[in-house]
Image (cartoon, rainbow, N blue to C red):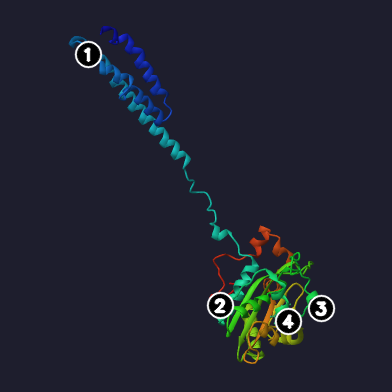
Amino acid sequence: MTDTTPSSDALGPLERTILDAVAAAGDEAALEAVRVAALGKKGSVSALLAQLGKMSPEERKTQGALINGVKERVTAALAERKSALKDAALSQRLAAERVDVTLPLRDPPAEQGRIHPISQVMDEITAIFADMGFSIAEGPDIETDYHNFTALNFPVGHPAREMHDTFFFNPKEDGSRLLLRTHTSPVQIRTMLSQKPPIRVVCPGRTYRCDSDQTHTPMFHQVEGLVIDTESHLGHLKWILEEFCKAFFEVKDVKMRFRPSFFPFTEPSMEVDIQCRRGKDEIRFGEGEDWLEILGCGMVHPNVLRNCGIDPDVYQGFAWGMGIDRIAMLKYGLPDLRAFFEADVRWLKHYGFRPLDFPTLAGGLSA
Ligand code: DAH
């Protein structure tokens, strides 16, 4: 047995090795590994203690005192190192998570973001018409020739089709071809095909024509209006448009001029100008002697009603279509249409609207 009994000479290096490992442990996990290797069930110090039972009483007395001395010193060193590591970890965290309360506040996203003037104007338009009892209707940007032209009473080969500078897709095998809608009027057709009168809808959305200069972009925005029931007439249309213009341009009174015009889908058809005063750099509404064209309108053509399965001897109504980009430019004094689509953050910061200032008639449209 004596050959397995550790001597004090053997204990010295073992203790030094353990204490060195304790000192070298860089974090609590490493320190725990050192503890397990020394004092764990299969640890080196535990193995020595296990041998005490096999010794003679005298041997046990001396060796027990020696081995327990090692155990105590190792335990104390582990505890000391553990608390030192804890303190170090805490100071490191405190340093890393330090907050400089004197730094200026950064604006939250709801304060930094801006609503594009087009979106703002669409929200304003829908708020005004919703207040008059209109619903919103939408249709696809990619349309069939039928919805964009034929159902709207553009006969095949009619020159009015050519005036729309249409973007066509490649023809399908059956010869039909899809297109990018050239106006929001096809949403009239989709609405009348899917709803029974009485109908009161406005349809804002994107429209496309192959046209690009200072005042035209290939993609632009329109809003369509449609009212179908048994008695709505041009007098109602005139009142609606006047109320809309007063609310939208935020003026008390506005004069409007209805000029005869032509659209295949309305009869009679009119173009509408509103009174304005043109200054050097600005334009004012509700005053002055100048006129500015803002929309097209008319009584829905009986052929269009018939194309949608609505009996023109029973039902009648009116429609209008208006360019959104243009009235946005007019209302907010935006000089260049192309800037709308350049996605320049500086421009948007200047002309955009705060996200939480949602336009309402009660709270003020653009306040
Ligand atoms: N769709 C026409 C255009 O883009 C605008 C228009 C005119 C719409 C008269 C209508 C309307 O609903 O009745 O030029």
Dot 3 amino acid type: Pro
For disc 3, the marked residue is 159
Dot 4 amino acid type: Asn
Is residue 80 shown left or right of residue 248? Answer: left
Is residue 222 shown left or right of residue 75? Answer: right
Disc 4 and disc 2 in contact, CB within 8 angstroms: no
Against 206, is 54 above or below?
A: above
Q: Who comes first in sequence, dot 3 or dot 4?
A: 4
User: Where is residue 270 drawn, in percent x and y?
Assistant: 73, 85
Is residue 93 shown left or right of residue 300? Answer: left
Disc 2 and disc 3 in contact, CB within 8 angstroms: no
**Mark 1 or 3, closer to the camera:** 3
**Mark 1 or 4, closer to the camera:** 4
Q: Residues within 10 Å of mark 4 (few under 14, many from 20)?
A: many
For disc 4, the marked residue is 153
Q: Who comes first in sequence, dot 1 or dot 4?
A: 1
Q: Quadrant of the C terminus?
A: bottom right
* Alpha-carbon span between mark 4 and mark 2: 36 Å
For disc 1, the marked residue is 54
Whether label 4 lies within 8 Å of ligand 1 gets the answer no
**Mark 4 or 2, closer to the camera:** 4
Label annotation for residue 361? 2
**Mark 2 or 1, closer to the camera:** 1
Q: Who comes first in sequence, dot 4 or dot 2?
A: 4
* Alpha-carbon span between mark 1 and mark 3: 114 Å
**Mark 2 or 3, closer to the camera:** 3
Instruction: Work out which residue is located at the far left of the displayed protein and give it.
Output: 57
Q: Who comes first in sequence, dot 2 or dot 3?
A: 3
- For numbered disc 4, what is the local secondary structure? loop
Dot 2 amino acid type: Leu
